[in-house]
Each structure stands twice: as C-alpha cells, then as structure tokens.
Amino acid sequence: MKKRMILLSLVIIVVLSTVLQLAPSSRESHVYAEEGIITADDLNVRSGPGLEYDVIGQASQNTSVQILEQSGNWFKVQFQNFAGWVSGDYVRQSPEQSQSLETLHISVKDTEIVVHTEPSITSPTIKKISSGQTYPITDKKKNWYQIQFTNGDRGWVAKWLVESSSDRQDEEQTNPLKGKVIIVDAGHGGADTGTISASGDYEKFVTTVTARTLANKLETLGARPVLTRTNDTFLPLENRVAHAQTYQAHAFISIHYNSSPQFPSVNGIGTYYYHDRQKPLATSIHQEVLKTTGSSDRKVKFGNYMVIRENQRPAVLIELGFLSNQQEEAKVNTKSFQEKATNGIIRGLRKYFK
C-alpha cells in the first residue's frame, strides 16, 4: 500500500515541484545541504512547510534524506528522486549540522531540569538533565526550547529554567554591569576628615552619601558593589587598594570632593588616572558625569594618588566638585546632584564595559 501511494505521488510531485519552485515563499527560510534520517514511520510529506499544505507522499522510518532547506520547524528533504516538506520533529540531522545550531546552556536555576515530549508542562517527560550541560537548540515555541541529544532524540525544556548562548550575549549587551564587581571607595573617614567646606562641613560626610547612593544603584542593576567603608571610620589607603585585589574587582571608583580656599570661585569636576591602562575608564566616567551634571570640565588628568597608583585593577579617582565654592557646595549637597552624579558614573561604567 505504501509503495502504491508513493508511486502515485510521483506523478503529482512532478507538477507540484515545478509550481512550488516558481511560487514565492513568505516564510523565512535557510538553505542546507546536509544528510538526515526520518525517525517516524509513515511520515507525511507535504507540498509546503506546514500542516495546511497537501500530503504528497509518505516516508518510512530510517529513510535517508538530504535536507535542502529549512523554514521554521519544517525541512524540505529529497529522497526517492523527489522533494517535499516534513516536520523537523521527525528528522534526525547529521552531527555536522547539529553543531552549526545555536547552543543551549542549562542554567543553575535548578539542579535538575525536566525534558518534556511537547512544549507543555502537562506533556509526558522524557528525562531529567543536570545544570551545566549544553545541547543544540532545534526549535523554539513561545517559552520553550526544543533540544537535541547525542542519540538524535529531542525534547522540550522550559525557557525560564535555562539560558541560551544568544540570551547571555543579549543580556551582556543590554546590561553590561550584571555580575561586575565594583569597589566604591568613599574618600577619607574617621580622623581623616578630608577637606573642610565653605560652610565648615567635612568632605568625608559628602563622599559617604555619594558612595552609598552609587552602591545602591549598582546593586539594583545587577552589579556586585563593595563599599570600602560603610560608616565614619578611618581606613588606611593600602586597605582600600586591597579591596580591589581581594575581590578581583572589575573597577575601582574612589569618590572625592575638591577644595581651593585661596580661589573660592574655582569649580568643576576632574577625574584622575595613574596608569595608562586606567585612562579609558577615567575618560568614560568623566564624560558621562559631565553630561548628567552639567558641571565645568576640569579634564581627565594624570594623578599620583596611592589608591590608583598601587591598584592593579581598573581604577579611577573622581573629584565631583569644589566644597570651597559656596555655590558648588550647596549644589553637590542636593539630592538632585547626587542622583545625577551617580547616574553619570553608572553610564560611564556601562559605556566602558560595553
């Protein structure tokens, strides 16, 4: 019966194949030239890539086919001197073709993840796979990935339990701060008051506010901020530098405010680096902070400061304004300025990590 149907289909296929070659396709397709194996018996062969197309033949299990084209989860295959479309669920591709597919990385959200026969949690389960393993993705449907095992079998895993290589790349591009260790160093502290402002306030208190605001925002954005000090205590400079090495920081930001009592009208923001390798980070942060605050530009400069000189990690020191200037002191103590300044630092970090 199968042979009769296939022989009868050959006549139809000669006509249909000509029509199909002339008809434009509205589906996105990819051209292949790979071998495959039919994994189901009496598999319907259709005139186009979808269940809405006519059945023009049937294929037996273990039949070798050549994959000519892919449209969605459908393959155009050639066998027995004619070509037609079959569901990709029932074609086992060659190892070479599987390697060219997107790789799926199983996340550590769950120690074991259930693989289903269909993209539904109510469908039967095939097996369980452990986190850290990788599989090629053969299809995607809504919140599900279809993956292929080394023996050719396929199953569906929930997208919310896993991440693909492209997912990770997209996240790195859209959120380059995720997972980054950022040391936030509030300048001075304890007996080291820092500069004294025009109104008699201490620099150490202003740097603490800025550092805490910055760290809170970084944590919200998925980074891993580490404050060198969390209260008004004295911390030796070498201990501040040690934080960067201990935590293998991706960046070290030392927060300061400037002073020039002999020139009370001086104002603006300056950013410092010591090693040339630190300059890109300093430049990126400086440019973005100027944009968000609208402050005067005192440039990116070389600075012989221990916290950046002895630092082996990307490190900068930023002076966010002059406390000796009454107008600038009043400005930097506003919530508006603190928001703008920390937003600028974050934008600079994002720009640098991209």
Image (tube, helix red, strand yellow):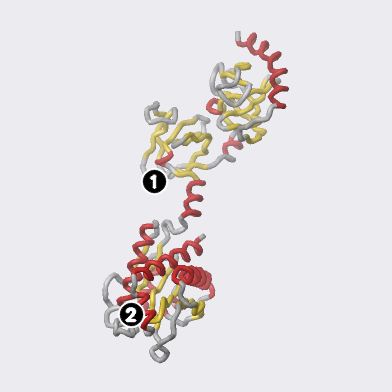
The N terminus: image quadrant: top right
Disc 2 + disc 1, Cβ < 8 Å: no
> Does residue 161 appear left or right of residue 199 in this picture?
right
| Relative image position of residue 58 (x, y in whole percent) | 60, 16
Type of amino acid under label 1: Val
- Crowding at dot 2, Cα within 10 Å, few <14 / some 14-19 / many 20+, comes out as many
- Crowding at dot 1, Cα within 10 Å, few <14 / some 14-19 / many 20+, comes out as some
Residue under label 1: 108
Type of amino acid under label 2: Glu
| Relative image position of residue 135 (x, y in whole percent) | 49, 39
At horizontal 61% and vertical 37% (from top left) the residue drawn is: 96
| Relative image position of residue 112 (x, y in whole percent) | 37, 39
Q: Real-space Cα distance between discs 2 and 1?
A: 44 Å
| Relative image position of residue 8 (x, y in whole percent) | 67, 11
**Label drawn at residue 203:** 2
Q: Nearer the viewer, mark 2 or mark 1?
A: 2
User: Taking 157 as reference, is 54 above or below it?
Assistant: above
At horizontal 40% and vertical 88% (from top left) the residue drawn is: 264
At horizontal 52% and vertical 37% (from top left) the residue drawn is: 137
Residue 257 is drawn in which quadrant? Answer: bottom left
Who is closer to the viewer here, 166 or 210? 210
